Image: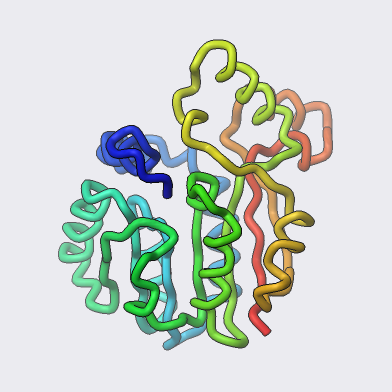
Amino acid sequence: MSSDGGNDAIGFFSERAEDFHELYRAQPEFFLERVQIWSELLDRYATPAGSALDMGCGPGVFTFYLSKRVGSVVGIDGASEMLQRCEAQRQELKADNVRFVQARLPLEREGDFEPADLLISSSVVEYVDDLDRMLAQFGRLVKPGGALILSLPNLASLSRNFQRVKFKLTGEPEIYRHIKHYSLPMLLRRRLKPHGLLFAEARYYTHFTRLAKIGRAFGWPRILTEDLFVAAFRKI
């Protein structure tokens, strides 16, 4: 991720680590669709007894989900406060096949990590300075025959574009100060193909903004109503 001290995305999420953990506990409906779609994809692409990397693991929701479906999983995040809570949960759950590592993305010490059967990155790569460098690293860290699953903000989302304009005019929502990249499955497909990652499928989901709810009610295409998408790729 970008590195301008406490004012970067890592600083933003570090300061809100407790809030994120509390949101997942107190308001699971806010993340319900995200978790459901991601869980379906993780079930489909996880390799029993295989390895997994969770790049930008945040509160560790998907790290711990994968721990029950693969042999070993490493959660990587730049926010120390997030990882402290993840480690406490790991000890509580006695999840011995999980470990957490603090590191910024893209990884400066890529050689410290073995390529994995599955690499996931949920709501992370939109914050890095150099997206192509990040995607190239993903390509190197997925084993041949393995899978990559990652999400990005939906470039065509009406809600996203409204929020982007609002931020330019008012400075809110603050998170938009850190978001650097928006995409579409077809665009991501082109960027990942040179790294040996071939598109398999994509799903759209939303944060249930008012505009998204209105669009759904009127039956608009999901590419317009949903503010995020997650895509799966296979490494050749």
Place of residue 72 in the rendered image (x, y in percent of width and height, measured from the top left) = 35, 80
Q: Which residue occupies 70% across, 62% down?
A: 191
Q: Which residue occupies 52% across, 29% down?
A: 176
Horizontally, residue 195 falls left or right of residue 26, namely right
Place of residue 127 in the rendered image (x, y in percent of width and height, measured from the top left) = 49, 45
- Residue 22 visible in the picture: no
User: Which residue is more in the foreground, 142 or 39?
Assistant: 142
Place of residue 74 in the rendered image (x, y in percent of width and height, measured from the top left) = 34, 71
Q: Is residue 78 above or below residue 99?
A: above
User: Which residue is more in the foreground, 191 or 23?
Assistant: 191
Q: Is residue 4 above or below residue 188?
A: above
Q: Which residue occupies 76% across, 37% down?
A: 156
Callout count = 0
Considering every residue shown, the one lying at the far top of the view is: 170
Q: Which residue occupies 47% across, 35% down?
A: 178
- Residue 217 visible in the picture: yes
User: Which residue is more in the foreground, 56 or 2?
Assistant: 2
Q: Is residue 72 above or below residue 175?
A: below
Q: How is the image coloured?
A: rainbow
**Image quadrant of residue 182?**
top right
Place of residue 91 in the rendered image (x, y in percent of width and height, measured from the top left) = 16, 65
Horizontally, residue 208 falls left or right of residue 70, namely right
Quadrant of the image containing the C terminus: bottom right
